[in-house]
Image (cartoon, rainbow, N blue to C red):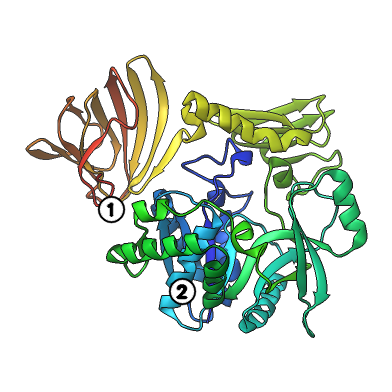
Amino acid sequence: MLIPVILSGGTGTRLWPVSREAFPKPFMKLGGEFSLLQRTMARCAPLADGRQAAIVSNREYQFKTREEIAKLPAFKSIQCTQLLEPAGRNTAPAIAIAALWADSLAPDATLLVLPADHLIPDEAAFQAAARQAAQIAQDGSLVLFGIQPTGPETGFGYIEAGAPLGASDARRVVRFVEKPDAARAAMFLQTGNFVWNSGMFCFRAKAIIAALDAHAPDLMAQARLAWAASQTNAAADRVELDAPTFAACRDVSIDVAVMEKAADVVVLPSRFGWSDIGSWKAVAEQFEADTDGNTTVGEAIFVNAHNTHVQSDDRLVAMVGVDNLLVIDTPDALLVASKDASQQVKEIVTRLKASGHEAARLHRTVARPWGTYTVLQEGARFKIKRIEVKSGQTLSLQMHHHRSEHWIVVSGTAKVTCDDRTYLVAANESTYIPIGTRHRLENPGVLDLVMIEVQCGDYLGEDDIVRFEDKYGRVG
């Protein structure tokens, strides 16, 4: 049984300000209808011969991920289990947990492990390579997908391929090389026996468990403890990993933990188009350029501008007399960078986090299990939000220590609980929630509820919420 396992844990700091901690890279859409995560799911859906799949992600993303699954027709016949991490611990613990899950599901399980944020336009070629990898993995080999280099790229790791493995296209792995400088990358390209390390794998569940036992026994033992402690939370489509035991897993990649040490590692050189979308420069390369080399997402005008990428969803951007730039415009943050410095964008996120700036974590519009809220304006002692609650959804029963709230319904009907009172508020009506009051907002209607919230108080941070009841499991 071939089971796709999608690793959806990266935050994509090089793609700020679109990718942020609360809305990471896998949920980004690159000028199309579907997100990177949805594209990955669609790409591997025909390979799930047992109609089983798993997505490993942070538990904070479980509701957004579930929405992504529900919107994808290709996944409607597949049982997709979410393996929810309380905190990111790198790829080795994630794969260890996925292997234990798959092994409990089917003793003959073979895993196809894929990052959620890669772009592969030629899906048929990828699927053919994946089926070949699954066949090779049946003898216990740990198969990596190597990408034939198209240039002396310094942003990828490399794999030196050795002797062929029988009659297949696979070859023994000689060594791994971390991201080289330009001179070494050019040398690797000339030798012809180096491929890029794609971070995609195929192996039997029992084989990777045995390899982890042999080369990272401490990690595998801890993963078993985490898996055993998580069973009380297991459901058909969701496993919340036990926080204390999983957090104790060593933070290490599967390459370092196993692949660089094991003897039965092979690489399958592949020629399908591939990009890990690791920078805004890589994003720009996915779009057709005009005669001056400019690319756009959204509305832009170029005058004497060359080799420049503009992304703007909400307003016109005009570029005059510029060259080799990246301009990424979002409602609350603007990035202007040289294409040659696109890898340095992650340093902005580091500085924002160090200063406690919310732009490292949140967009102006924030997704919640019940809908969204958008910060329209804020200042000293006030914040104004637009809140949209989906039909039939309910916010938690909660209380604030530092702020009061005024709610004005724009459309739909709100069901409001305020201490011991429960009442309806219709469009063009309002209500007031005093500081320290237990309250809840519900949408009992069939249409989305839209309202404006005006907060007033000494402190207006999102962490001033005490939850008493919550249908989404966020209490405590």
Q: Residue at x 55, y 52 (%)?
A: 26
What is the quadrant of residue 301 in the picture? Answer: top right
Looking at the picture, which amino acid does disc 1 mark?
Val
**One can see residue 77 in this view:** no
Residue at 24% x, 23% y is 402
Which numbered marker is on residue 102?
2
Closest to the observer: 99 or 9?
99
Closer to the camera, 385 or 128?
A: 128
Decide which of 231, 306 is in the foreground and name it.
231
The answer, for residue 284, to whether it is visible in the render is yes
Q: Nearer the viewer, residue 76 or 156?
A: 156
What is the x, y in percent for residue 22? 46, 42
User: Mark 1 falls on what kind of element?
Assistant: loop
Q: Which mark is residue 171?
A: none
Alpha-carbon neighbours of circle 1 within 10 Å: few (<14), some, or many (≥20)?
few
Secondary structure under badge 2? helix
Q: Residue at x 82, y 44 (%)?
A: 181
Residue at the outermost right position: 190
Q: Which residue is labeled 1 in the image? A: 446
